[in-house]
Image (cartoon, rainbow, N blue to C red):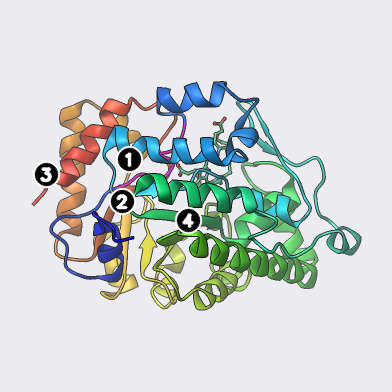
Amino acid sequence: MKLQNDLLLRAAKGEKVERTPVWLMRQAGRILPEYRAVRESVSGFIELAQTPELAAEVTIQPVDLLGVDAAIIFSDILVIPEAMGLPYEMVEKRGPWFPNTVSSEEDLKKLRIADGANDLSYVIKAIEITKKNLNGRVPLIGFAGAPWTIFAYMIEGSGSKTFSKARAMLYKEPAFSHRLLQMITDSTINYLKAQIEAGADLIQIFDSWAGILGPDQYEEFSLRYISQICDAIQEVPKTVFAKGAFFAREAMGKLNCETIGLDWNMGIAESRKLIGPNKTLQGNLDPAALYGSPEQIQIATQKMMGEFRGSRHIANLGHGVYPDIDPEMVKVFIQTVKDFR
Ligand code: CP3
């Protein structure tokens, strides 16, 4: 099906666009009362993510309600550990929790490489329904976590300020760490290929915990695997968002992907210099800017747009939108991007 609005895809590929496309990380979620209503009709986040009709519904909500230029499939990065044999729970107000973690060769033997289409058939079904119901209005973004970020949760068992157990593993058991990272990478490639087959028009890799590694470890334990994923996926444009990896910008410029996501700590002009002219940059307004007044949001957004002007850009925040942001303020951000010339 031909897309009516393909701004995102053209911007990703560096083709000419009439205006800069805009979407928000975490746009399908708690900022919308309409999401919370659907969420309350089921037992929890996981049931919602595993019910394809409902996952498709909340995926499309921000397209209707906010006017974004892309939908992102409603799911989570932690479906990969689950598909590999390590299930998670989403604890209300606290976040993800794994009843079992991985710490030995024995644990590794209990895991398998996920195959995507079967092990994650509920996500694949949700993508198919979403594509049908979007009816070509905007592109659909598929996604996965970067292997390092997934590894961090599988070792740690939950979120953490330091992920010290996961980082300790890199020092104590590097060979074991590489084996697990390779299993996650193979699973992720299978999963992303299945998403693309089902209709995902672009894929994004989230390396949310990139910033807790030093540059050498980041190269060895994260970038190497992201690079494998980028090389394996040729079908659609790819975006790599590595939060906090300011030290890896030059290296990211050499990845086999079209777009690099910037967080709000990364200067725009400096990032462009380090990454080079041949990538689209995505971002990077501080999500906290949306707590300001409409006038303040307009000023901050125009400043950001001005700094990106004249080079390949997809507008977004520098990380996911915070759940208590007023959707009206999200609309001010989106409209300001759309009006910018
Ligand atoms: O972006 C979207 O709108 C699509 C859906 C999406 C979710 N999670 C839904 C979700 C995406 C792309 C993610 C990615 C994700 N999940 C990341 C990478 C992006 C980032 O923020 O750095 C990470 C680290 C996770 C893991 C995760 N999932 C955490 C730490 C939490 C708890 C904290 C929180 O935000 O609540 C989740 C839960 C989660 N994932 C929710 C949603 C809508 C909230 C659960 C609920 O509705 O109760």
State which tag comes first along the sequence, 4 or 3.
4
Q: Residue at x 21, y 33 (%)?
A: 332
In this rendering, which labeled residue sits more in front, label 2 or label 4? 2
Residue 210 in picture, x, y percent from top left: 54, 58
Mark 3 nearby-residue class (10 Å; few <14, some 14–19, many ≥20):
few
Is 45 magenta? The answer is no
Q: CA distance from mark 1 to mark 2?
A: 8 Å
Distance between mark 2 and mark 4 Cα atoms: 13 Å
Disc marking residue 63: 1
Q: Is residue 30 left or right of residue 19?
A: right
Between discs 3 and 1, the one toward the N terminus: 1
* Nearer-the-camera pick, 120 or 76: 120
Is 87 above or below relative to 281?
Answer: above
**Is the Cβ of the residue at disc 4 closer than 8 Å to that at disc 3?**
no
Q: Which residue is mark 3?
A: 339
Mark 3 falls on what kind of element?
helix
Label annotation for residue 138: 2
Residue at 41% across, 72% down:
257
- Residue 336: mark: none
Of callouts 3 and 2, which one flags the residue occurring earlier in the amino acid sequence? 2
Determine whether 139 is above or below 178 in the image: above
Please give left or right for residue 336 compared with residue 2 in the image: left
Q: Residue at x 14, y 53 (%)?
A: 306
Is 25 magenta? The answer is: yes
Tag 3–tag 2 contact (CB < 8 Å): no
- The residue range painted magenta reads 23-29
Q: Secondary structure at mark 4?
A: strand
Which amino acid type is shown beneath numbered disc 1? Val
Please name which of the two marks, 3 or 2, marks the residue nearer to the observer: 2
